[in-house]
Amino acid sequence: MKKIAVASDNGKVTEHFGHCESFIVFHAEDKKIVKVETIASPGHRPGFLPLFLAEQGIDVIISGGMGGGAVDLFNEKNIEVIIGARGTAQEAAEGYLDGSLLSTGSVCSEHQHHDDCGAYGE
């Protein structure tokens, strides 16, 4: 079983990982979603969320954008990072499972300015 967490606001992929309201977690077997749960975000504190999600057994994190420090921490925990996603959390998880969602590698350099994290399509 693979656990895919999508950083979400109102069911949509959030623009900035650290400020999302929740993580929608899709449990997948054989590339099919078999269970969905929502975990409220415990809040943004530097370095905390990657550890929190690792403790939840997450295998993949999907977000619109994410700071480089968070990407590094996820990598250290062997959690795959997909950034540059858009649309609904469900579409993002399904896209990941069918191979159509690929990370753009858009890393936010200044997480205080979440409106500037739009480096998509490069």
Image: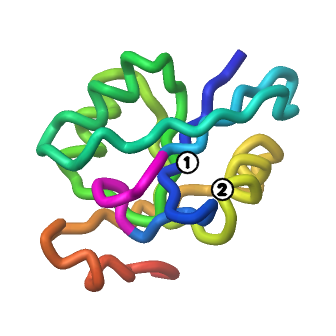
Which mark is first along the chain, 1 or 2?
Answer: 1
Q: Amino acid at mark 1?
A: Val
Specify the quadrant of the image occupied by residue 52. Answer: top left
Nearest the eye: 88 or 116: 88
Nearest the eye: 98 or 87: 87
Residue 67 placement (x, y as % from top left) = 24, 57
Say which residue appears at 82% left-offset and 21% top-offset: 29
Relative height, residue 121 to residue 67 (above, below): below
Residue 10 placement (x, y as % from top left) = 57, 64
Q: Which residue is mark 1?
A: 6
Circles 2, 1 touching at the beta carbon (< 8 Å): yes
Say which residue appears at 20% left-offset and 34% top-offset: 48
Does 17 appear in magenta? yes
Does 71 appear in magenta? no
Residue 115 placement (x, y as % from top left) = 29, 84
Chain part drawn in magenta: 16-22
Say which residue appears at 25% left-offset and 46% top-offset: 43
Q: Which quadrant of the rendered structure holds the C terminus?
A: bottom left
Relative height, residue 73 to residue 120 (above, below): above
Relative height, residue 47 to residue 96 (above, below): above
Element type at mark 1: strand
Mark linked to residue 89 = 2
- 1 to the left or right of 120: right
Q: Amino acid at mark 2?
A: Ala
- 65 to the left or right of 82: left
**Badge 2 density bin: few <14, some 14–19, many ≥20, Cα 10 Å:** many
Element type at mark 2: helix
